[in-house]
Image (cartoon, grey):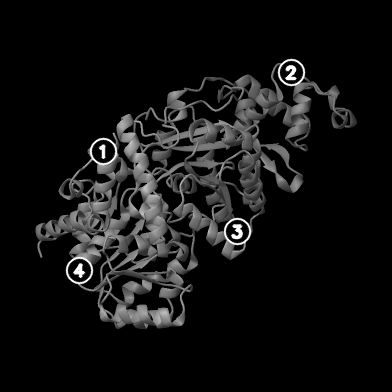
Amino acid sequence: MSGTEVADQARQLLQTIFGYPAFRGQQEEIVTHVGRGGDALVLMPTGGGKSLCYQIPALLRDGVGVVISPLIALMQDQVDALAEVGVRAAFLNSTQTFDETMRIEKLVRRGEIDLVYVAPERLLTQRCLDLLQDTHIALFAIDEAHCVSQWGHDFRPEYIRLSVLHELFPEVPRIALTATADAQTRAEIVHRLALENARQFVSSFDRPNIRYQIVEKTNGRKQLLDFITGEHAGDSGIVYCLSRKKVEETAEFLQEHGIRALPYHAGMDNTARAANQARFLREDSLVMVATIAFGMGIDKPDVRFVAHLDLPKSIEGYYQETGRAGRDGLPASAWMAYGLQDVVLQRRMIDESEADETFKRVLSAKLDAMLGLCETLSCRRIRLLAYFGEHSGPCGNCDTCLFPPVSFDGTVPMQKLLSTIYRVDQRFGAGHVLDVLRGVESEKVLQWHHQTLSVFGIGSDRGNDEWRAILRQAIALGLVWVDHDAYGSLKLTDSARPVLKGEQRVQLRQYEKPVKARRASTPRGHVEADLSAHEQQLFDKLRWWRVEMARTHNVPAYVIFPDATLRDIARARPTTLAALRGVSGVGDKKLASYGEEIIRLIGALDAGD
């Protein structure tokens, strides 16, 4: 078929099955290219519609579409969502009985299925490869393709072996997809998956609906509570913590303060962890407190905020995690509390890792970029997008745009800090250095007679928190490093010399005493900013109806309809099936399944009015 014919058929499937009137961005170009048998590497932000880029070509082409996905825990929900729109889908993974596996394999061999989801470990078994060689394959979709990169944040060793698909099935088109890949990771995906001849589609990494905010950490849990209650009361959200213990303690803290929160980490019992994930996906107004073990592939579209109580290791990780907010395109927040201890801890983790020196240098460079994002005086979105090679102007929707930080010439205070580190022989940690700097006659200061040093008290004009902020920026700027082999002592780098000599000026962010979380203009709870009171009433009714439907069908609520579709129904207020068909997200199958009930609900509400 010609490209025009494939595109026409693709648009028809988009409308009749998925209920969308038109493709977004590069979707149509990607679908047409893969539908005609071409290989592709697709970089598209979370919520940009990556799934349609392989689902529709799989429906267009003869045979079974094979989707390689790293998370078996989410396959059921993805299959359920496809079933809701009338697509024949199944998965093969270790959660199934032998009889169920045999049944699915028989459907695959017969071509009586449109899409089958397989974990990479399962796909690489001889049994599965034999199955695929006995099957007419429409395409291979390699989701979360950044997992192939040894330099990335989600490395999966088995992904490297997926080049076998090119070797065994050279005529079958392959599409690799990810939301997170810098130039180095992109090159590794191409090399490892033998996609040198694939066409690359790189969409904008910008998520304009997400508001980025990074605050000075004082009491992280209290600040988190203020943020949630002040800006996202009643919303679904994810809170990321570095350790399992902190996950448990934070979830308990939020529960004690009236927030429905659940923990998730790799140390939990498998049954309990799976149950918490299922509740988060299926229920509204839940907060998941988790380590980074949670999240990849999460399809829940109405996550209104992602919060970090610990500094991520890289911008890729931060972007991937924050991208789980606002997949439906509605306003969402990415909030982080960040302090000196975060910098020290991340540096120590790199120093103490068993990786070789080359890998440690890569990790350090990624951390430096993350610190640069935290400490930037300009628009955070500019800094974030620049990391991925994309240029933009000030966004007007991040904290540094909305509340511009004050910068000042920090050369003199930085010289005072560096001089103090030098005068105590670079043998002491942050607490002792700052006591000497501020003129505090602590027991340790007196023990070492450091009250006699010329630098004792030269920083008494600033408080401890302000000096800690300056020290954090010194570490972020590469002027100071923390020697964990010497009990966390602060040491000067070669870059400190020109600053000490006055040959280089230093610009710093002015310390601001933390205040209670600023109220943003983001709508609180489930009140939709663009709905009238009459429309809001219908929206609320539809959400309650959706809860009952989801419970009946045993699927997440968003699988029935996402909030964005319910909002459009509330605004359109259709009174006929024909009118409902025109609402974005209402395809033929959903119209047949739920159309009459929605029309009756609207009619009953109007009659009551």
Position of residue 530 measured from the top left corner of the image (x, y, whole percent) = 31, 31
Per the image, label 2 sits on a secondary structure element best described as: loop
Residue under label 4, please give it.
61
Quadrant in the picture for the C terminus:
top left
Residue at 67 percent across and 53 percent down: it is 352
Identify which amino acid the numbered label 1 is placed on: Ala
Residue under label 3, please give it.
355
**Marks 4 and 2, Cα distance to the nearest angstrom?**
73 Å
Nearer the viewer's eye, disc 4 or disc 2? Answer: 4
Mark identifier at residue 607: 1
**Marks 3 and 1, Cα distance to the nearest angstrom?**
68 Å
Residue at 85 percent across and 22 percent down: it is 452
Residue under label 2, please give it.
460
Position of residue 488 measured from the top left corner of the image (x, y, whole percent) = 73, 42
**Marks 3 and 2, Cα distance to the nearest angstrom?**
41 Å
Q: Can residue 206 be seen in this view?
A: no
Residue 550 relative to residue 133: left or right: right
The answer to which of marks 3 and 4 sits earlier in the sequence is 4
The answer to which of marks 4 and 1 sits earlier in the sequence is 4
Alpha-carbon neighbours of circle 2 within 10 Å: few (<14), some, or many (≥20)? some
Dots 3 and 2: beta carbons under 8 Å? no
Quadrant in the picture for the N terminus:
bottom left
In front: 599, or 527? 599
Nearer the viewer's eye, disc 1 or disc 2? Answer: 1
Nearer the viewer's eye, disc 3 or disc 1? Answer: 1
Identify which amino acid the numbered label 4 is placed on: Arg
**Marks 1 and 2, Cα distance to the nearest angstrom?**
72 Å
Q: Can residue 256 be seen in this view?
A: yes
Position of residue 369 measured from the top left corner of the image (x, y, whole percent) = 50, 41
The answer to which of marks 3 and 1 sits earlier in the sequence is 3
